[in-house]
Amino acid sequence: MTVKEGDTMRRDESSGNYASGHDVHDRDVENDEHDAPKKSWIGRYMDDLSKSDPELNYAPVVLPWRIGLFLLTSTIVQSLSYTAVSSLNNPHGTWTMKQSQQFSSLVYEMLYLGPVFGLCIDLTRIFGERFRPVIIIACAINAIAGFVAFGCNRVPSEYGSCLMLSWLIEVMVMFMYIPMNSVVINYGNRVVESPGETSARIGGLMAQAMVWRSTGNFIEQIFENLGHGVYPKYHFQLRWFGLIMAIGSCVLIVQALFLTKRAYYTDYRKVSLKGSEPVRFYKNVAGIGKKALSNKAESPGLKLMFILCFNFIYLMIPDALTGTRYSFNSHWSGQFSVGLKQTNAILGNLAAVLGALAYALWMYFAQRSESTNGRLYRANPFVILLVATAVWIFGIFFHFIGEMGSTNPHFSYKVFLQFETIVVGACLRFTFMPTLSLAAMHAVRFYESTTFQLYSVSTSGAGVVCYPVTTSFMQSLGVTTLKGYWKALLLFMVLRCVPLLIAASLPKFRDDETIPAIADHNEPLNEMDSDHPAKGTQHDESDKLEHREN
């Protein structure tokens, strides 16, 4: 390359090529004419992300089929793995009480370590990729565990082998589905339509992901009930089940390598020892006290913690659909045939698909109305929770019809329970989505896995608390599922409205305002801790305030 005398050679950081001094001077003059503000780290990050994949220049509304297909397959493998773990739980009925308790605490309670696993995933970078390396490693180890279960016939007869193999499968499954949930959140939060965007768009994406996942559970349930069989008539042994699980894990590796785009996983920030993710995390932790005492800005993640606390209260309220319904229905379903029980289980998973699909369609049309007409009320968190509460109450009322039918000798529970399974399953999945969407919307950037697992722990913890609270509530009323149950159901409907008193305070807008917005014509936003706004951003702030007031 020939350069005129007096010119200087400078490296263009965005392209990696060298340009002459005149070229650089021309670009500088052009930038000065447009008064372009200096780009923040998130602006440079999104520029690099957009260059890697042209499809990333718009705020996504529909989940790509590549991500959806991976969610479908991973959910099938996840369900198969859980079934294998259940089969390894005291397979011959010879364990002592202490061994059974140890197995449950070490295997089934690993969910509560999810935030720690999520943080490890968020801090991991291999060749610039965030999630795919973890998924591939977890799938490979899970496949090995499946092949071991297939090849070693003595595994079910030894307590230590069952415990270690089950624990390994449980942990690897968590390292498979946690990153994929983070991929969905990261994909939806890469760019927003406007600075005042509500939860409609990200809620629609999370609901679409739930449709794919629920469909995977539905397919696995059909296979488990019709192909695998039910106790005590299994069509094949556990070792063959491990082989199917291992093959599914290998399929996931192929999907992660060849059917998903690298842009879904790549962190385009510049990598250095001082700027590595663990160092950033250490600095953030070290600065918690300083930020908490600062009077300039709110502590990051404050809105997320409020949502998690609300989710715990929302799900821990005494309820019939998640607790006493199973006890009441067992008095009638115990007389059902094996085929009818299998049908009921399959219908329950089908209902979950319908509930998630209904929420996805609602959020899709709400987002379209919001983006075209600016109507916030359609996606207001309080309105969403109000509708979800009404749906939950309708599910309890449908169960109430079944309770009233217990006094009618001509009432057929063989028919009614099938319809109840569909209605209640769809209602529960629909009412689960609003808080999940809000948590995804306010997920801390680059810590999506930790955020999602904190939400999972909040949900599971609420479920654990809900059952004893419901039992104590019914005991205080002096009723059971066989005597005076209708009184408790009426009070359950009233109690479901209690969280609405807090729902009015739920945040309507994002916590992280550094995410680029399409409505800002791709102008970069400043970092959250910047004291002085960049030149030309005052007009953006006035537009944002006007949008929120409307």
Image (cartoon, helix red, strand yellow):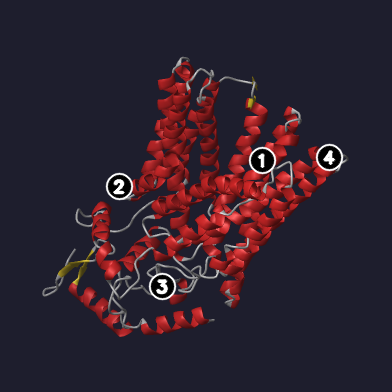
- Spatial CA span between label 3 and label 2: 28 Å
Q: Nearer the viewer, residue 127 or 125?
A: 125
Q: State the image coordinates of residue 134 (x, y, percent, origin top left).
A: 37, 42
Q: Quadrant of residue 511?
A: bottom left
Query: The C terminus is located in which quarter?
Result: bottom right
The residue identified by callout 2 is 127
Give the mark, 2 or 4, whose residue is nearer the N terminus.
Answer: 2
**Residue at mark 1:** 326
Q: Secondary structure at mark 1?
A: helix
Residue at horizontal 38 percent and vertical 62 percent from the top: 51
Foreground mark, 4 or 3? 4
Position above or below: 21 against 411: below
Is residue 190 visible in the rendered structure shown here?
no
Residue 81 lies left or right of residue 45; in this view the side is: right
State if disc 3 and disc 1 touch (CB < 8 Å): no
On the image, the x and y values in percent for residue 370 come to 58, 72
Q: Viewer-nearest of labels 2 and 4?
A: 4
What residue did someone put label 3 on? Answer: 522
Disc 1 crowd rating (10 Å Cα; few below 14, some 14-19, many 20+) is few
Q: Is residue 329 left or right of residue 252?
A: right
Q: Nearer the viewer, mark 2 or mark 1?
A: 1
Task: Name the amino acid type tagged 3.
Answer: Asn
Between 267 and 464, the residue placed more toward the observer is 464
- Provide the secondary structure element on which disc 4 rests: loop
Q: Amino acid at mark 1?
A: Tyr
Q: Which residue is mark 4?
A: 412
